[in-house]
Structure formats: structure tokens, C-alpha cells
Image (spheres, rainbow, N blue to C red):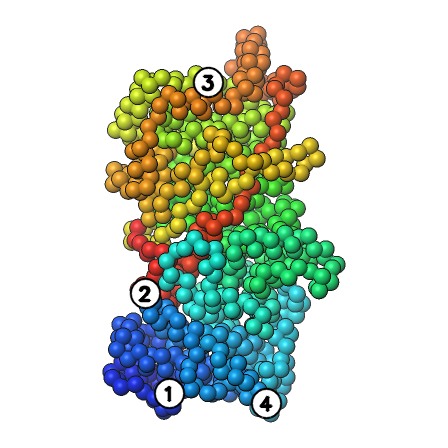
């Protein structure tokens, strides 16, 4: 009954606040204490008992009362942070104020007139709750800064959020102002060896404070997307500045809590159904705080990463470059000890692989839900800390990251609500593929049997990657078209290092070329021929640099030689172009796409389930358009000594893909013909963006355009291979009466083309290049993930979000 009474009192206080027409004085403590002093409401209670309509009504009709409520709640947090939360009553007040501010803040952010409220000072507020020695400067501190500093202090409050190091008694309570929070880091790992005993209530208290912190940072959701790279979040900028004395221990605590988390524990079946896991909620909030705080201007982040790389590990702190203003980015870019890098990589790999864990008992192990946040965190680590990137690629451990990424790509390919997940996964692979070591590591045999609905094959991790990329292109949905260039760029980047492709992977590559080189597809968009250029580059790289082990691919090229001859003899006269386009219309009517492969390897792995579309009514958030492949990559040539030399930007046929940048994800942003990979309904096809449809209408194939790129098709190496090997293979077949391909493969394995092929071309690698377009995409995607994942309580639901649109599938 007591709990019901406190809820009733709390609700009465809310009603009083909404019905009062006159401002309530800030000094009327008896009135304001009703909201936090005597209540024991959960965060769910607060969201139920303080309806959105009433918050908006107070905001419009009694703005001074809402301002005072926010100020008084914040004042109690500042007082508690100063006193150290020594009593149970004080701790309850802190939690109640935290929950109330988490509920109210989004409604302050959504109103442009209120947005400056937290960055103002309160006139005549005096020093209530502030330290006496702070002087006038503290009085002038904006509310936002006081709130952030109070939260930071409370996150290292003995007996509330961390274990005390002293015997607990009121006389010996630790002074929160004098403690060194570096001794109170939450978990062992980077820079901290001691692992504190688990404490359920500390984890829950940290989680509530982190949720409020995330709500403070979420002001970014209420501003329209802007390509201004300098448009940094002021809440994040202050919190991650030198003003926050807890920046280092908090960054380390968040990182260690995430990377040390093991959802499976001792592996007791169904343990997650028997016991509540407070650590999972904390890890969930911690990883979201990390990805939001690791925000940096495009140029300065890259500089920080390379500065940290150039600094010798033995150099003194004073000699190191200053690095970025954001201390979280600064600390991340400086992590360099092997054991620290290994701890981070192992932790991220363990969590990313968690949904792939197979057991004999259905649903007996806990499955985490924050894999999208982990992918963003992994991306930021690779982007801001080049030592970490090189450490990842130094051993086969990178495959522990690759396999789950490919699993997520395959699983999400049919689900339009997960198109953002597809993009981040492909961006990570694009980043990794720019390094030689990634291609080399892919030659390791793939022996795991993660259940995916892909053909059964025996081969390497490179085969797995190619098979899944083929599945995405031929069996994905329309909004994945902008990713085709990226997918093929990854294959181009790794191709010079692939020692032996399986027959399944070789067939998939040839099948893509067959589909992309049909006249009606090439003539249907100004961009489609680039896909052919990419695939020819893949074949040339393998033939020139890895011919010896790739008899399967050579055999497939010989078997499908007609594709190359037809490409070399592609008609370019106007009559042929029009005829091909008429065939395209007929194909549309017949609803035939290239997804109907005539490949024989259609048997999927045991235990796999097909990728399924999103359930009707699933919420998704819109995304910014991603820049074209030439905007997000920089061409580099591999020199004789293995170093990369930047290639100046040229107007090659592949270099104009930025024209397909398109519109936002609320529309389909590609000119490419959807029929190439999947038959779409007329309704879906009509959702072409005004940008791309108007561009497509203005463009049409003509003989000059076809000749401009046809002359540059890199077919010489393949034609020479066919010229040499086809007569030899035909002769063997006739002489020995062969009908079995294994004998031909044996002959090709021992064959050589040394001295017969053109001079090997230099290896060209397209490395990922950060820019404002991708930075804006990441910000939109990150906040969209956070919005959709925070549903209990629904912090931002039904508020006026402007960074993205919320849509139903």
C-alpha cells in the first residue's frame, strides 16, 4: 500500500503543477520536495505519471514553473554530488530527480524557444548546493554544465555507484571532492587491473545516471541534419573537455564494462531466464554513451589517429601532441599497449559473435541486442586509433570480427528496417579492405558452420565473403542498390591477395558479370557500366597476381567465355541500344530478375533460416544519403616495396559514381534498374526519389556515351588468357575424350601463363576516406539506433525529432 500512496502523492504533485496558473516560488521547498523527497517511484512510474501532454501544457502555459522544476531537480543533484550521497534518503532523491529530468528534457529540446534554457544561468540563484570556495565563476556556470558535472561526480560516488574504500559510517564517509576517481574505475581492463566485486544496486544506479546523460546528449536529435562538420554537440563537447575531472576514469570505466561483459557467463543453460542481469542494462547504456561521446570533426579525428601512431610508445606524456579537444577521442587514440588492444578486440569479438552461438537447447543462451552499437564502436576505434586497426589485422583475430559482420549482412539483407545495419557493416569491410593484411587473412580456411542460408561450400573466408555479397546483390531489396559499388570495391581491394577461390565463389563472380554485362542493364543507367569495370578488375588482379592457385576461377572464365566475347563486341549503334531497352521492358513485364541463378549450388547450410523481410508495422528511422564511392575512397597504388602511393583523381569511367548520391533513405536513391537483382512490386518501384528519377529522365544512352567507356574496358588480360588456354583445353578434351571437369582442373593447376600475359598492371587499392557526408550519415544512423533501442522507458517516443524521420514498414 505504501508504494501506491507514494505514487498517488506524486501524481497529485504533477496535477498541482499543471493546474497552477501562478508561478510557484523556487523557495517553496515544501511544494517542490513532493516530486522527489517522499516518493519511491520507478522510472516506468515516472513516465506513466507524467504524461507528455501535461509536460507540454506546463511548457506553454506556466513556463516559469517548468523552468523552476528543472532547476530545483538539478540543484538537488548538484547538492548530492557535493555532499556525497551518504544517506539512503539522499540517494532516493538523486534517483527520483534523475528520472524526472530524463522524462522532461526531450520536451525542452523539442521547442526551439527553450533550447537555450540549460545554457543560461539562473539570476539570483545564489550558491545553493554549490561549494563555498567556488567563487563567482561557479555562480555564472550555465545549468547544462552544472548538471553534467554533477552527473559525473555522482557516477563515482562511494556506496552509491562505486564501492567505498573505507569502513562505512557517517563519520568516516569519503569526501567526494577529495577522492581520486581513477581508483574507482568500474571494471578491470584498459589501465586498471583490479576488478571490483559485482554490485547489483551500483549497476542500476549507474544505468539511471547514464540514461539521463544520454538524454542530455540527445539534443542533437531535435536539430535538422546539417553537413557542417563544426556543428558539434555542446553537451558532448563540455562533458568530454578538461572541465570534467572524471573524463579519463569514466571513459575507461565505460570501455572496460563493455569489453569485459560476457553475456553467457558460466554457460549454465537458461540462466538469463532465472536471474536478472543488471550488467546487461549497464553495458547497453555504456556502449551508447561511448558512441555518442566519440564525436569529432572529420579532419581533427584523423589527425589525432595518425599523431598517436607516430608517437613512440616510450615517449613521455609531455612530449606527445596535444590531440583533439574531446578527451574521450584523445584517450581512445592513445591506447597502444598490446594487452589493452587485445582486451578490446577480444571483448568486441565475443559480443559480436554472441548471436551466432549455437546450442542444442533452443534459446538457452542470452542473445544481446546491441550489436549495431558495437559495430559503430568498432568503426570508431579503427577510424580514431590506427594502432588498433593494425593490431586487428596483425593476426587471424580479424576473422572473429568478419564472420559476425557477414552473418548480420546476410540476415538483414531482406529487411528494409535494417538498411542502416547493412551500410555500417559494408563500411567496416571497406575500411578493412584498404589494408593488405585483410586480404591475406581471408585465405584462412572457413571451418565454422554458422547457420546462414547460403550455398554449402568448402573454401576460405574470402569465399564466404563473395558468396554473401552475391546473395546481397541478387536477393536484397531495392534500397541496397547504393551499396553495390562498395561491395564490389571490397572484392577489388582483396582480389590481388586471394590464393584460391572455390568453385562456388568463382561461379558467383561470373554470374554477377553475366548479369551486369547484359546490354539492357548497361544501357538502363549512366552508372551501371562501373560494376562491370570493378568485376573485370577483380579477374585481372587474380589472373596477374594469383594465377597458380586459382584454377577454379580460370576454368569458370573459360566455361563462360561467351560473356567476355559479348562484352568486347557490345553493340553501340542507336538501333541496338533501343532494341536492348525494349527487351528490358519485356523483361519487366515477365518479372524476371537475375536472382534466378542457374547455379547448381542452391542447398543451404543445415539449421539456417532464410533472411526475412521486416514485420509490417516495424519502426525504422530515415538515413542521410551516402556519398558516391569516389567520394568515400581514395585510390592508392601498391609500389614495388609494398607501400601505398596516392593516385591523383582522374575522370575515369569509374570515377563519376557520385552522380548517384541520391536522396535520403526515405526514398530509393539509385538510378539503377531494380530488375537486375530482384523483382519489385510496381508500388515499390514507383517510390523513386525525385532527384534520381529526374536525373534518369534527363539521361539516355547514346552511341558516343557507350563508346566513351567501352574503349576503356580492361579485357586484354582475360582475352589473352582465353586465346592461350581455350585451344589447349579443347585439345585435351578431344584427345583424351574428357567429360569430367576434375581432369581439366588438374591440367589448369599445372599450367602457366608466364611470359604470355601482358605486363602486370599496378595493384590499385581504394582506401576509405572520411568526409562530411559520411560523418553526417553516421550521426543520423547512430541516433536512429539509440532512438529505436530505448523503448523501456520510451525516452524520445512521440517527441518532435528533426534529425531523422520515424517510419513504419
Q: Nearer the viewer, mark 4 or mark 2?
A: 2
37 above or below 143? below
Q: Residue at x 33, y 79 (%)?
A: 66
- x, y percentage for residue 164? 60, 80
- Disc 4, disc 2: CB below 8 Å? no
**Residue annotated with mark 3:** 568
Mark closer to the chain start, 1 or 2: 1
CA neighbours of label 3 inside 10 A, class few (<14), some (14 to 19), many (20+): some
Residue 218 in view in this figure: yes
Q: Quadrant of residue 333?
A: bottom right
Residue 329 location (% of width, % of height): 57, 60
Give residue 503's position: percent from left, percent from top: 53, 28
Mark 4 — residue? 169
Please give the label number shown on residue 646.
none
Q: CA distance from mark 2 to mark 3?
A: 57 Å
Seen from this angle, which residue lies furthest top?
735
Sequence-first tag of 1 and 3: 1
Q: Element type at marker 3?
A: helix
Which class describes the residues within 10 Å of circle 1: few (<14), some (14-19), or many (20+)?
some
Residue at image location 31% in from the left, 17% down from the top: 575
Whole-Å distance between the Cαs marked 1 and 4? 33 Å
Q: Quadrant of residue 734?
A: top right
For marks 1 and 2, give the CA distance. Answer: 28 Å
Which residue does the numbered mark 2 point to in the structure image? 799
Label drawn at residue 26:
1
Q: Nearer the viewer, residue 643 or 175?
A: 643
Amino acid at each position: 500500500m505504501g508504494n501506491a500512496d507514494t505514487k498517488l502523492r506524486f501524481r497529485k504533485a504533477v496535477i498541482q503543477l499543471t493546474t497552477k496558473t501562478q508561478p510557484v516560488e523556487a523557495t517553496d521547498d515544501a511544494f517542490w520536495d513532493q516530486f522527489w523527497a517522499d516518493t519511491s517511484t520507478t522510472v516506468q512510474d515516472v513516465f506513466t505519471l507524467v504524461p507528455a501532454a501535461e509536460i507540454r501544457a506546463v511548457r506553454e502555459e506556466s513556463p516559469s514553473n517548468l523552468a523552476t522544476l528543472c532547476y530545483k531537480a538539478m540543484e538537488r543533484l548538484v547538492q548530492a554530488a557535493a555532499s556525497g550521497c551518504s544517506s539512503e534518503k539522499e540517494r532516493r532523491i538523486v534517483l527520483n530527480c534523475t528520472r524526472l529530468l530524463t522524462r522532461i528534457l526531450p520536451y525542452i529540446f523539442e521547442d526551439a524557444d527553450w533550447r537555450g534554457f540549460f545554457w543560461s544561468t539562473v539570476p539570483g540563484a545564489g550558491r545553493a548546493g554549490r561549494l563555498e570556495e567556488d567563487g563567482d565563476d561557479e555562480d555564472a556556470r550555465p545549468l547544462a554544465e552544472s548538471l553534467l558535472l554533477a552527473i559525473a561526480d555522482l557516477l563515482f560516488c562511494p556506496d552509491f555507484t562505486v564501492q567505498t574504500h573505507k569502513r562505512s559510517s557517517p563519520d568516516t564517509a569519503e569526501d567526494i571532492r577529495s577522492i581520486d576517481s581513477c581508483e574507482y574505475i568500474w571494471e578491470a581492463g584498459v589501465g586498471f587491473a583490479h576488478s571490483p566485486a559485482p554490485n547489483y544496486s551500483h549497476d542500476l544506479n549507474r544505468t539511471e545516471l547514464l540514461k539521463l546523460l544520454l538524454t542530455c546528449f540527445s539534443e542533437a536529435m531535435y536539430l535538422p541534419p546539417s553537413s557542417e562538420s563544426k556543428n558539434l554537440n555542446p553537451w558532448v563537447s563540455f562533458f568530454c573537455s578538461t572541465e570534467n575531472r572524471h573524463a579519463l576514469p569514466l571513459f575507461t570505466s565505460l570501455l572496460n564494462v563493455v569489453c569485459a561483459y560476457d553475456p553467457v557467463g558460466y554457460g549454465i543453460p537458461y540462466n538469463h531466464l532465472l536471474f536478472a542481469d543488471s550488467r546487461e542494462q549497464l553495458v547497453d547504456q555504456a556502449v551508447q554513451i561511448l558512441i555518442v561521446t566519440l564525436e569529432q570533426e572529420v579532419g581533427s579525428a584523423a589527425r589525432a589517429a595518425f599523431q598517436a601512431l607516430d608517437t613512440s610508445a616510450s615517449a613521455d606524456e609531455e612530449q606527445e601532441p596535444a590531440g583533439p579537444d574531446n578527451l574521450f577521442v584523445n584517450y581512445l587514440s592513445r591506447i597502444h599497449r598490446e594487452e589493452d588492444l587485445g582486451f578490446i578486440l577480444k571483448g568486441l569479438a565475443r559480443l559480436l559473435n554472441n548471436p551466432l552461438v549455437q546450442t542444442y537447447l533452443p534459446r538457452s543462451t542470452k542473445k544481446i541486442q546491441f550489436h549495431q552499437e558495437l559495430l559503430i564502436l568498432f568503426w570508431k576505434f579503427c577510424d580514431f586509433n590506427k594502432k588498433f586497426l593494425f593490431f586487428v589485422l596483425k593476426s587471424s583475430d580479424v576473422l572473429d570480427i568478419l564472420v559476425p559482420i557477414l552473418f548480420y549482412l546476410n540476415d538483414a539483407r531482406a529487411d528494409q528496417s535494417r538498411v542502416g545495419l547493412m551500410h555500417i557493416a559494408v563500411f567496416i569491410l571497406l575500411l578493412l579492405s584498404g589494408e593488405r593484411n585483410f586480404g591475406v587473412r581471408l585465405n584462412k580456411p572457413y571451418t565454422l558452420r554458422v547457420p546462414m542460408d547460403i550455398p554449402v561450400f568448402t573454401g576460405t573466408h574470402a569465399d564466404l565473403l563473395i558468396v554473401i555479397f552475391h546473395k546481397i546483390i541478387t536477393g536484397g531489396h531495392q534500397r541496397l542498390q547504393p551499396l553495390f559499388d562498395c561491395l564490389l570495391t571490397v572484392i577489388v581491394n582483396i582480389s590481388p591477395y586471394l590464393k584460391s577461390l572455390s568453385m562456388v565463389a568463382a561461379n558467383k563472380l561470373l554470374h554477377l558479370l553475366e548479369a551486369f554485362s547484359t546490354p539492357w542493364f548497361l544501357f538502363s543507367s549512366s552508372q551501371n557500366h562501373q560494376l562491370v569495370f570493378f568485376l573485370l578488375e577483380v579477374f585481372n588482379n587474380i589472373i596477374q597476381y594469383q594465377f597458380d592457385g586459382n584454377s577454379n576461377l580460370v576454368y569458370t572464365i573459360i566455361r563462360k567465355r561467351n560473356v567476355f566475347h559479348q562484352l568486347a563486341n557490345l553493340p553501340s549503334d542507336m538501333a541496338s541500344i533501343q532494341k536492348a531497352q525494349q527487351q528490358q521492358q519485356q523483361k519487366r513485364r515477365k518479372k524476371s530478375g537475375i536472382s534466378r541463378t542457374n547455379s547448381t549450388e542452391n542447398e543451404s547450410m543445415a539449421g539456417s533460416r532464410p533472411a526475412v523481410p521486416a514485420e509490417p508495422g516495424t519502426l525504422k528511422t530515415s538515413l542521410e544519403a551516402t556519398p558516391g564511392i569516389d567520394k568515400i575512397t581514395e585510390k592508392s597504388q601498391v609500389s614495388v616495396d609494398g607501400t601505398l602511393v596516392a593516385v591523383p583523381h582522374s575522370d575515369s569511367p569509374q570515377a563519376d559514381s557520385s552522380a548517384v548520391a541520391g536522396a535520403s533513405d526515405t526514398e530509393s536513391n539509385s538510378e539503377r534498374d531494380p530488375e537486375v537483382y530482384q523483382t519489385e512490386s510496381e508500388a515499390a518501384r514507383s517510390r523513386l526519389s525525385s532527384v534520381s528519377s529526374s536525373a534518369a529522365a534527363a539521361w539516355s544512352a547514346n552511341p558516343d556515351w557507350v563508346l566513351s567507356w567501352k574503349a576503356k574496358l580492361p579485357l586484354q588480360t582475360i582475352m589473352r588468357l582465353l586465346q592461350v588456354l581455350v585451344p589447349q583445353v579443347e585439345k585435351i578434351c578431344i584427345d583424351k575424350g574428357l567429360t569430367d571437369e576434375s581432369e581439366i582442373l588438374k591440367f589448369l593447376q599445372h599450367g602457366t601463363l608466364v611470359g604470355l600475359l601482358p605486363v602486370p598492371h599496378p595493384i590499385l587499392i581504394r582506401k576509405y576516406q572520411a568526409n562530411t557526408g559520411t560523418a553526417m550519415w553516421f550521426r543520423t544512423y547512430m541516433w536512429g539506433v539509440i532512438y529505436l533501442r530505448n523503448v523501456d522507458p520510451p525516452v524520445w517516443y512521440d517527441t518532435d525529432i528533426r534529425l531523422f524521420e520515424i517510419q513504419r514498414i
